[in-house]
Image: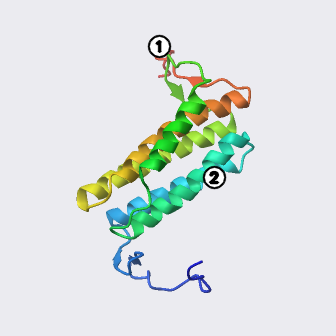
Amino acid sequence: MGNRLSKIYTRTGDTGTTGLGDGSRVPKDSARIEAIGAVDELNSAIGLVLAESVPENVGTVLTRVQHELFDLGGELSIPGYTAIDEQHISQLEDDLDGFNADLPALKEFILPGGARSAALTHVARATCRRAERRLVKLALAEQVSPLPQRYLNRLSDLLFVLCRVLNRSAGQTDVYWHKTRARDT
């Protein structure tokens, strides 16, 4: 194990900068810190899902994803370092295929909702999309590996499928969007 934090506050960020893993300091509103923060928010949103009662196979996958997201944050905090690779993306695709295999085909758009665990997973999915957008913005400004962006794209797909799995597991149906419903004025 690396260094342990014995003192949580350092005061080094009081001037609006924060330290990266390579020792350099950057503004707290830089594209890199925005991307790191969005990945951290995503990991926290998945933690909320895991605080619910979810099927064991869902919990196992999401716990693994939390560790991978922590690694992804580490990759982003050390310019030039790589933690996410093709295997991580392939695993998400395998997970997607496995969970989606038993679900009925979609013919309509789904609104966020249903069981509490599914609704929280929709929040995680939307947070994942934001993290992906922040990573795209970072890639426009700095050289970063394209693999984390692909990872987040697949993860958002997996989270969408898990919303459906969790609704089904809770005995609830997905909440379908109805284009022609009466509009309130």
Disc 1 marks which amino acid?
Answer: Thr
Q: Position of residue 134 (x, y in %)?
A: 36, 54
Residue at 66 percent across and 41 percent down: it is: 58
Q: Where 112 falls versus 64 (above or below)?
A: above
Q: Residues within 10 Å of mark 1 (few under 14, many from 20)?
A: few
Q: Is residue 168 above or below residue 126?
A: above
Q: What residue is shown with label 1? A: 180
Where residue 47 sits in the image (x, y, percent)? 63, 54
Label 2's element? helix
Rendered location of residue 160, percent (x, y): 53, 35
The residue shown at (44%, 85%) is 12
Check the image and report above or below for 6 versus 31.
below
Q: Tell me, what colour scheme is on the image?
A: rainbow
Quadrant assignment, res 153: top left
Q: Is residue 176 left or right of residue 145?
A: right
Q: Quadrant of residue 81?
A: bottom left
Report how far apart the C-alphas of labels 2 and 1 lie in the structure. 40 Å
Between 89 and 152, the residue placed more toward the observer is 89
Residue extending furthest toward the front: 87
Q: Taking 100 as reference, is 149 left or right?
A: left
Amino acid at the residue labelled 2 = Thr
Q: Which of 98 and 185 is in front in this view?
A: 98
Q: What element carries label 1?
A: loop
Identify which residue is drawn at 41% across, 69% down. Answer: 77
**First in sequence: mark 2 vs mark 1:** 2
Coordinates of residue 42 in the picture (x, y in percent): 52, 53
What residue appears at the point 58 percent right and 32 percent down from the top-left corner? 98
Nearest the viewer among 147 and 172 is 147
Q: Can you tell which of label 2 and label 1 is closer to the viewer?
A: 2
- The numbered mark at residue 63 is 2
Q: Dot 2: few (<14), some (14–19), or many (≥20) neighbours within 10 Å?
A: some
Q: Can residue 116 be seen in this view?
A: yes
